[in-house]
Amino acid sequence: MRLVSSKIFTMVGWIYQPILISLAVLLITLSDKVHGGKILVYPLDGSHWVNMKFIVEALHSNGHDITVVRASNSWYIKENSHLYTSITIPNTGGFDEDFFTELVLGKYLKIQREHGQSFYTQMKLQSLLTESFFKFHKNMAEVISRVLDDDQLIRSLQEAKFDVVLTDPSVAGGTMLARRLGLPLVHNVRWTVQGEAHMVLAPSPLSYVPFVASELTDKMTFPQRVSNVLTYFIGSYTLASQTEPNYKPVVLRHFGPDVDYDTFFQVADIWLMRTDFVFDFPRPTMPNIVYVSGFQCSPANPLPPDLERFVQSSGEHGIIMMTLGTLLATLPEEIADEIAAGFAMLPQKVIWRYTGPPPSTLGNNTLLVDWIPQNDLLGHPKTRVFVAHGGTNGVQEAIYHGVPLVGLPLLLDQPDNLSKLTARGAAKVVNILTMDRRVFREAIEAVLYEPSYRENMQRLSGLHRDQPIKPLDKAVFWIEFVMRHKGAAHLRTESYKMSWVVYYSVDVIGTLLACVLLVVLVSLAVVRWVCRKVFCKRKVKKE
Amino acid sequence: MRLVSSKIFTMVGWIYQPILISLAVLLITLSDKVHGGKILVYPLDGSHWVNMKFIVEALHSNGHDITVVRASNSWYIKENSHLYTSITIPNTGGFDEDFFTELVLGKYLKIQREHGQSFYTQMKLQSLLTESFFKFHKNMAEVISRVLDDDQLIRSLQEAKFDVVLTDPSVAGGTMLARRLGLPLVHNVRWTVQGEAHMVLAPSPLSYVPFVASELTDKMTFPQRVSNVLTYFIGSYTLASQTEPNYKPVVLRHFGPDVDYDTFFQVADIWLMRTDFVFDFPRPTMPNIVYVSGFQCSPANPLPPDLERFVQSSGEHGIIMMTLGTLLATLPEEIADEIAAGFAMLPQKVIWRYTGPPPSTLGNNTLLVDWIPQNDLLGHPKTRVFVAHGGTNGVQEAIYHGVPLVGLPLLLDQPDNLSKLTARGAAKVVNILTMDRRVFREAIEAVLYEPSYRENMQRLSGLHRDQPIKPLDKAVFWIEFVMRHKGAAHLRTESYKMSWVVYYSVDVIGTLLACVLLVVLVSLAVVRWVCRKVFCKRKVKKE
């Protein structure tokens, strides 16, 4: 009896096992969401956190348990939030509002105003940036060093059994922590510590891939291609000089001498790339790059009533909005005066995020505000032009809402971001230091009244929005994919493990050339030997 | 009064225009589908059409009007269909069942059986394939030439105002027709006339990107890398020798001498790539490549009742299914005998698509059928092993349903397809010519009873199925995207327009090296001049 029943069980097992396995696979496959996963976030502060927070919110609403590592003097990342538990690392200095206001206003603009637009100025600015970012990365390296030194913290992180580390690799801390904890890694990225993310990961033929700081397009003349190659080498060297001396010693101390610092970034399972090919020029990419440009964008919500009233008061002329991003809410007086005077000459209403003292030339049509509901204002049907510094977030929101730009780029990737839109005829760039009220007004009028600017931006907007799934959903899907499958190794190429000699097949080509040379030499030797024999014979005969 | 009303109209226009524009953009964006578009399909016959038909069906059910160009002696593409209107081009010879049966059975297998597995055999087989495919492409070039010569046909195609050309660029006709009609182009592709599609379009470092026919993986030893480089050059040359002499004269005649034949393929707006990185090894890719591997797969439908009864009769042992694809429904007697004898020794039931005379060793457990509902059988919970030749369609269906393979590869990409699954531990390959019944049975038993094969295939299946949208939906979305935006130029890189000198920056590097050399030479000249001056002076002094 027992035998029979066991046989029946075995049979039932045989019959149903495949069905059950298939069902399980199907269920796992069909469920897009991994509920109750644990995610460790190692963000970068400032505007990068503004951006990262959108993903944190989406992950939170999908039921995940999120832990965020922050510095005690964090600028934007709150210690207490309903979205996450925070781990606070003691810190002084580093990346805060003072650092940037001092850098941009106190030094960057000052140098340019004192010395004008010369090669000397450019060198001085470059050395200022290098020095500032060297200090910044030094501080970031101290923070991650404090994390790795804290055995108790590391133990508790290990015991928490996170599923994935989500980081912004503009600082190296998150990648080190992922390696220390042996966890899958997802980058929310446009830059890594080593450079523009594509350049770090994917083949980048410099003949049509412009280096990010170069302000070039994918169609380059010969001199431009020369400039692109030089910019690439100089830019990469400069970046390395700011970061490597700071992070490499930490890696050496915590991971030993046999570990390659570069691979800390390249092992990432998924790269959520904060760009797309509506904004960037088309270029080679990689299987584990997911384009999530504009994931922070959403249809506009209604404005606060008083702002809405102000906007409506613009009538047929519509409004102009201006902000120079999280970094710069104030400007030197004479610059602010020119801008205000330029605005005052226009029939439009203007909303300007500006926290400095009101400029003397301020017109009746201009409203100064401390804070701007940027996405909602960009999505407002009355918004005609966006005056911006060209930070990635703002530019992408402008594309999403189809609002053309007047750009006042300051530093970092801002000139380059704006040059991309200028190349598409969707923005006009003005030099904030050399312009006067007339130049500024004319730039705005061009974008207001030449229909091509708006048409081009609307075309970009149409292309950007025409995606099978929304960028934020894509970001969440791929983070959860990594959680479900404990990584995404099948999407990561072998390239990061290779030396450049192997990667470029230099050894193979060398060997093949050597073989060809050998064959040629041996053939020559044989021919010579035969000739000599024949020649000698003849000689002997003659004699 | 008129003035006032016109002003009101202007105001209303000013106010509502942006709203209307935004609404229109939103509507275009939200509507995933372009109803009533017109699509011109230029397919390749045989198994490629089996595959293309899935996309044609999906496009048809989205309300598009489809026209298919077919040859009068088409093997698979029916003249009359509710899915499409056909345009029939008179043809004899070319790609039909006889061509392939003769090639594979009459020649390819015969040579191997007569001459054994030697270098001589390999050379003979290679020359057989080259000769056969030369003839095939010659015929395909004649067909497109007949199309382009027919002014009335071209005029009617121009007047039909198609939105897009969809083609399989394994033959060059579709690309030429798209160029002639000036239409956007979408490839449904794994191979183009110039080689594996990735190799044609994307950077492919041969250090970790195995050439498709090489049976190598992305982890190569030094000798393997040497072999990969050699295979790449020989393979590319061989392919070009089969195709270019046939198509280039057609291009010259119809498009003039200034047109670059290579660009006919590279200008495609979207490449629907019939692979993914569950099947292929990860490698660089391009913005306009969309991975649609397995779009032909769907959950299994119930089997016909008699087949279901046969399958159920297998009890706990389950079934084995075998098919060698569309090309080969019969085999030489002695090979068929060994296969049948191998099957007869197993407790499983076997369903074998075989149209030849029943082998003398056929067991009671084996059912020979003329046609196999492949997808439904692969998806049946009782299916344990799939014995297959390794064609792309079958391999991808096996991955979709998670059924491990015993591979009997014959020619073309089949050995390579199977080697990819072997590298993942999801298939076992047997040489159909050298195996006997014992070897064949042991291979099947290994895949049946070693759990790793099934587990690995189920893992691949899980990864493959875990996508945010289904591959077929993705394919349709991107075809419709191209129709909506009249192309996808923003996703196509500039690389295809470049000579290799420019692409690899050879001119830039040369110039920079020349500059360095010049500086060195001038410096040396100056040093020498100074030295001489000093030296001369001393000499003079001494004298």
Image (spheres, coloured by chain):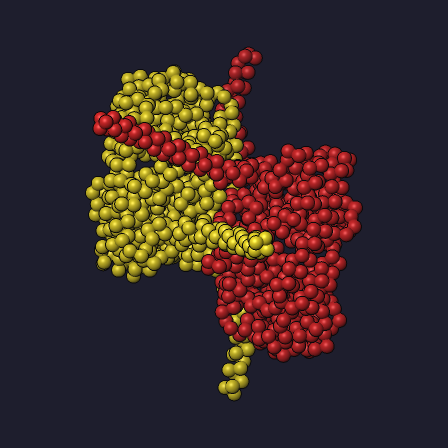
Chain colours: A red, B yellow
- Seen as rendered, the residue at the extreme bottom is B1
- In the displayed structure, A371 sits above or below B474; it is below
- In the displayed structure, A150 sits above or below B11; it is above
- In the displayed structure, A428 sits above or below B189; it is below
- In the displayed structure, A335 sits above or below A493; it is below
* A374 sits left or right of B292 in the view: right
Residue A262 seen in this snapshot: yes
Front position in the image: B89 or A356? A356
Residue B397, horizontal then vertical, whole percent: 42, 35
Total residue callouts: 0
Quarter occupied by residue B183: bottom left
Residue A145, horizontal then vertical, whole percent: 74, 41
Front position in the image: B401 or A322? A322
Residue B162 seen in this snapshot: no
Residue at horizontal 54%, vertical 73%? A446
Residue at horizontal 70%, vertical 73%? A334
Q: Quadrant of the C terminus of chain B?
A: bottom right
Residue at horizontal 65%, vertical 42%? A175
Quarter occupied by residue B53: top left
Residue B2, horizontal then vertical, whole percent: 50, 86
Residue B229, horizontal then vertical, whole percent: 42, 36
Front position in the image: A386 or A316? A386
* B81 sits left or right of B223 in the view: left
Residue at horizontal 52%, vertical 57%? A227
